[in-house]
């Protein structure tokens, strides 16, 4: 037991030291734009929806406003401040966070089918898929809620809210291929100004009715919900949860900024600004109950409405950009850990990790977002669709964090007490959001279900394909022995055969020898593996085994946050003197192009899932392109595999 705990303890110490080294003003400012864009724009709609839900049972607007402020305040304290900022940020994988990093940390990818680990993997992949549902809803509700501010001064502009929102979102998705490096430099300053404005508006509102400060007492929320009845309380809880959506970005973006800058930005600016603004909106409704239609924009003076709409639109675009970039990053990690098929991933800033663009995901996400805008038409309607996916994700994150804590050797009683408390809160909010399924909550769940199905099908299909390969793959000694008894034509140069396995002869190598009766002078069998750690040092990149004279097996290892490149890996092998330089001269890289043949009489997946897997495999990015091999060096050798 002590041996298993030592690496974790060492990693945690290294991570904490790295976090302190990385505490720079630029990181704190950057976290404002990337991490807190989503939760920072929640005041546009969350409080309004919570009060509307609270008054649906006949309560007065002032009483509902006080109860809603109290509920939102303590939700921010318990869920975001204590659970995420204090607890969840500790469950890092060598400085990286997110649901996929948790799965890697737990080693769920290697679990045997039917085991507890396999069940854990399913739960984790569902959690990852929920982020895609969230990614479609967040840009829609955020930008809609900002543009709806136009109706405060000009109700006649109401019919133009949806078209303007669509134009902004289309423009946002159109510029994704350019990368966000340049735009990202203004994210932090704009959001810094946004949070300052939130705080100032809140202070101005509080001065209208200082009695709203009584909402700091958590019993005001409990008392209101106890007297409101279960249906109203559940509706209010579901609406108030909108105020904490976006808190999960703290953990997802851990690797980009470090725990300390994220915590400092939250406690020093974001949380105080949000609290002041919610208190201000509550005070406004106590003084002017008729402001319920849009209390956020009614907080500001008339002359500032249009500038505030402009700033709010910029803030919501930033929030949307942050969630889009997060979905790109999640996709890359999922591909590299074998949960999704290889797809084209474009590095938009070579000097900065994480700046990527995934064309297929971008346009599918754009389609889902625009459908949500057109289908629901307003932030009020979208509020019913928003929250259920995030509440499920938060519950799954709490569960996985508890398992990580147990794996690291923390006291089980303490783990069950602390994580059990937060899981109970997550389940309450999930139950409250579940009543909104028919109001639109089904939309992100359908998206998440589709993504989860693809992830599970791809992983299971690859397991079946690998089982089929094992049955056909020759052992090294058998293959090498056979070469000695065959009259082969020796061709000049080096042949590199990419393989998915660390042992045995790739099918396309044995097929090449069988059909051509020839072989290059030098042979490499190359396997690129993604480890369940974020990065792998260059000096540990390549491991070379000499199988015979001029016959090498090369294992290249990458972290799930890295881009695997066969040329870069071979260069590492040469630099570390594991391979002689001349081996890379005149190299041709052979890639197996496998055609999947679904067969209903073979035990595996249901026929429709086997056909889905075959479709995904046919449309996946070519192996050579995915691993950065120049097209002119690639030769594909076809193989049929039945599953």
Image: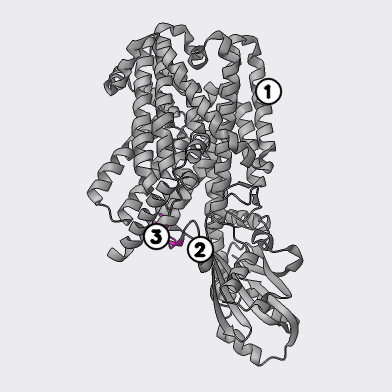
Q: Nearer the viewer, mark 2 or mark 3?
A: 2
Q: Residues in magenta?
A: 110-119
**Residue situated in front as seen by the camera: 293 or 205:** 205
> For this view, does 184 lie left or right of residue 56?
right
Residue 247 sits above or below residue 125 on the image: above
Task: Identify the residue shown where x is 64% and y is 22%.
Answer: 162
- Circle 3: element type: loop
> For this view, does 5 lie left or right of residue 107?
left
Which label is found at residue 163? 1
Q: Closer to the N terminus: mark 1 or mark 2?
A: 1
Which corner quadrant holds the C terminus? bottom right
Q: Is residue 210 magenta?
A: no
Which label is found at residue 537? 2
User: Residue tagged by mark 3?
Assistant: 115
Provide residue 378's location: percent of width, then percent of height. 57, 22
Residue 177 sits above or below residue 303 on the image: below
Provide residue 597's location: percent of width, then percent of height. 65, 64
Find residue 209 and report its image quarter: top left
Find residue 153 and report its image quarter: top right
Q: Closer to the N terminus: mark 2 or mark 3?
A: 3
Crowd tier of the residue under label 2, counting other residues whose Cα lies within 10 Å: few below 14, some 14–19, many 20 or above: few
**Residue situated in front as seen by the camera: 135 or 41:** 41
């Amino acid at each position: 037991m002590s041996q298993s705990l030592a690496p974790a303890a060492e990693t945690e110490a290294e991570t904490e030291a790295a976090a302190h080294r990385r505490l720079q003003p630029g990181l704190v400012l950057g976290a404002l734009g990337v991490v807190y864009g989503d939760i920072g724009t929640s005041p546009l709609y969350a409080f309004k929806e919570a009060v509307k839900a609270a008054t649906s049972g006949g309560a007065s607007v002032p009483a509902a406003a006080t109860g809603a402020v109290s509920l939102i305040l303590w939700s921010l304290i318990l869920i975001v401040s204590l659970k995420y900022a204090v607890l969840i940020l500790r469950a890092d994988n060598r400085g990286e966070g997110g649901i996929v990093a948790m799965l890697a940390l737990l080693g769920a990818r290697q679990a045997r089918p039917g085991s507890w680990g396999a069940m854990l993997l399913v739960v984790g992949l569902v959690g990852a898929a929920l982020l895609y549902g969230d990614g479609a809803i967040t840009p829609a509700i955020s930008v809609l809620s900002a543009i709806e501010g136009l109706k405060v001064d000009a109700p006649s502009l109401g019919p133009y809210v949806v078209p303007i929102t669509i134009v902004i979102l289309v423009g946002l998705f159109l510029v994704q291929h350019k990368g966000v490096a340049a735009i990202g430099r203004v994210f932090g300053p704009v959001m810094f100004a946004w949070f300052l404005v939130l705080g100032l508006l809140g202070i101005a509102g509080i001065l209208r009715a200082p009695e709203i400060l009584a909402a700091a007492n958590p019993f005001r929320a409990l008392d209101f919900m106890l007297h409101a009845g279960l249906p109203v309380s559940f509706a209010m809880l579901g609406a108030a949860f909108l105020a904490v959506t976006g808190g999960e970005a703290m953990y997802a973006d851990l690797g980009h900024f470090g725990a300390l800058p994220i915590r400092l930005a939250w406690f020093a600016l974001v949380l105080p600004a949000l609290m002041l603004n919610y208190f201000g909106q509550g005070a406004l409704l106590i003084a002017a109950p008729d402001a319920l239609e849009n209390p956020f924009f009614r907080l500001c003076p008339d002359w500032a409405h249009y500038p505030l709409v402009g700033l709010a639109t910029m803030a919501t675009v930033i929030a949307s950009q942050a969630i889009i970039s997060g979905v790109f990053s999640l996709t890359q990690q999922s591909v590299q850990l074998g949960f999704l098929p290889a797809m084209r991933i474009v590095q938009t800033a070579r000097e900065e990790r994480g700046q990527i663009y995934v064309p297929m995901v971008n346009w599918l996400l754009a389609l889902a977002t625009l459908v949500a805008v057109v289908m629901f038409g307003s932030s009020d309607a979208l509020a019913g669709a928003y929250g259920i996916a995030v509440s499920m994700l938060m519950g799954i994150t709490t569960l996985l964090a508890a398992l990580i804590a147990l794996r690291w050797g923390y006291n089980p009683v303490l783990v069950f007490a602390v994580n059990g408390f937060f899981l109970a809160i997550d389940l309450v909010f999930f139950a409250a959001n579940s009543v909104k399924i028919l109001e639109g909550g089904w939309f992100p769940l359908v998206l998440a279900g589709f993504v989860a199905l693809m992830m599970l099908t791809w992983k299971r299909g690859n397991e079946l394909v690998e089982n089929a390969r094992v049955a056909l793959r020759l052992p090294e000694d058998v293959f090498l022995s056979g070469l000695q008894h065959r009259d082969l034509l020796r061709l000049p140069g080096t042949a590199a055969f990419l393989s998915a396995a660390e042992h045995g002869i790739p099918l396309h190598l044995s097929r090449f020898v069988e059909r051509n009766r020839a072989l290059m002078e030098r042979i490499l069998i190359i396997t690129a593996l993604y480890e369940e750690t974020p990065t792998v040092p260059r000096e540990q990149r390549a491991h070379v085994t000499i199988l015979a004279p001029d016959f090498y097996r090369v294992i290249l290892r990458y972290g799930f946050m890295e881009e695997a490149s066969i040329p870069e890996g071979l260069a590492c092998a040469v630099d570390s003197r594991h391979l002689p330089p001349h081996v890379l001269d005149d190299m041709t890289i052979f890639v197996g192009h496998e055609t999947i043949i679904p067969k209903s009489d073979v035990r595996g997946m249901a026929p429709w899932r086997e056909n889905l897997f075959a479709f995904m495999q046919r449309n996946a990015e070519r192996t050579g392109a995915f691993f950065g091999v120049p097209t002119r060096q690639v030769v594909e050798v076809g193989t049929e595999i039945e599953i």
